[in-house]
Amino acid sequence: MISVHTSPFAMFGGRDAGGMNVYVRELSRHLVERGVAVDIYTRRTDRLSPQITPIMEGMRLIQVEAGPPHPIDKDSLFCYLPEFASDVAYLAISEGLRYDAIHAHYWLSGWAGHLLRRYIDAPLVLMFHTLAHLKNAVAQDEHRETTLRLQVERRLVDLADAIISANPDEREEMIHRLGADPARIHTVPPGVDLERFRPADGYAARHRLGLPDGPLVLFVGRIDPVKGIDTLFDAFRRLVHDHEWEGPAPRLVFVGGLIQIDDHGSTMDADLQRLAARAEALGLSDYVLFHGAQPRERLPLYYNAVDVCAVPSRYESFGLVAVEAMACGTPIVASRVGGLRFTIEDDISGLLVPHSDPAALAAALRRVLIDHDLRSRMQVGARQAAVHFSWQTITSAVLGVYEHLAAANPVIASA
């Protein structure tokens, strides 16, 4: 596995730590349980961290040199990819390793995987996770993806031996916009851990998290313009201030960003400080509860503690947060974009609304919060829908892609 720009073991909800990190980690774990040995390569961002960390029997995290050993913006990483590929090759050759497949995640890793094949004879499996031209279709000018990324993604659809798309729309985009060979694209959505993410006592979860009584809406994710947080805050202003509520008004539980806690108290990172200032300007200081990024094992508590989970993204190739919440039996209100259109059944497991539409988002959230019967029905529908995304099912499908390549290349067990 190759994940150049972010470690799969980084804290979920940090700047570059989102659904892709979870995907790489969980897929690797389930592949190991099926008898596949997996090495995960990522860029070293801390000089003191060990180069090789055993995660479990059959799986290692390997950090290689590629540029300065500290975090740098991912848009500056492309020039270090030759160094990354040569370091991976040096380690593999010095250990006498023979990889049966290179599975790369994101365009940077895809290019690193392409360069790696100069040294290692193995087929390249690529999952983009997001596509630049789809992000640019909804991005504000200062957040548009680079021309370099657009060009590299177009090249990679020709260079990869197999491509895994997260949803049918993404597959069609790669075929018709990027010129990909349909025979090389396999649509396999990410999965969810149905044992970890399952319905539990909501009142007990609230108590453990110290959350108040009354209606609760949850947001979980990175602080990134594509996540639609501005739309969510504008919708929440309408929800709180434009309606009368019997009892307490709704509160938004915000899980994402970094909060540092020390002997002197807690300090928000710059992104969270900006959001807190925005909440204050909208009159929401008493209604937005900033909890910062949380360890994975605590997320089921949050999903079970709330009444509804909001996923207001402008673009989402899959929407892992939505499926995790659904697995906990929590209704979703989400944008009708990308993979969310395929994971959420409108009016059954949640409600779909146009992206970037605060009025529609507020109306849908209010509908779920005030209609107990609808919410109860969606709780059942959400869990039933999530069952289709079990990691057992998804891992079998990914193994099918590997086996397809092995049949086509008999010389070819994964990096």
Image (cartoon, rainbow, N blue to C red):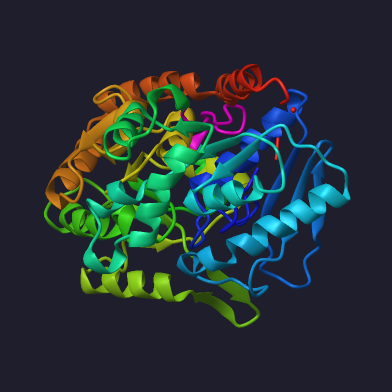
Position in image of residue 185 (x %, y %): 44, 27
Residue 173 falls left or right of residue 355? right
Q: In the picture, which quadrant includes the C terminus?
A: top right
The one nearer the camera, 67 or 259, is 67
Quarter of the figure that contains the N terminus: top right
Q: Nearer the viewer, residue 27 or 156?
A: 156
Q: Identify the magenta region.
A: 188-202
* Circle count: 0
Residue at position x 60%, y 56% from top?
4
Q: Is residue 190 visible?
A: no
In the current view of this chain or complex, which residue is farthest to the bottom? 264
Corner quadrant of residue 57: top right
Is 399 situated left or right of 411 in this image?
left
Q: Residue at x 44, y 36 (%)?
A: 325
Residue 82 image point, x, y percent: 62, 61
Left or right relative to 176: residue 89 = right
| Displayed quadrant of residue 176 | top left
Question: What secondary structure characterizes most of the magenta part?
Answer: loop
Task: Give the x, y percent position of residue 153.
Answer: 41, 48
* Above or below: residue 85 compared with residue 142: above
Q: Position of residue 179 (x, y in %)?
A: 33, 36
- Is residue 100 rendered magenta in the image? no
Residue 275, visible in the rendered structure: yes
Residue at left 81%, top 55%?
52
Q: Quadrant of residue 270?
A: bottom left
Image point (30%, 35%), residue name = 173
Q: Residue furthest front?
A: 118
Q: Nearer the viewer, residue 154 or 396?
A: 154
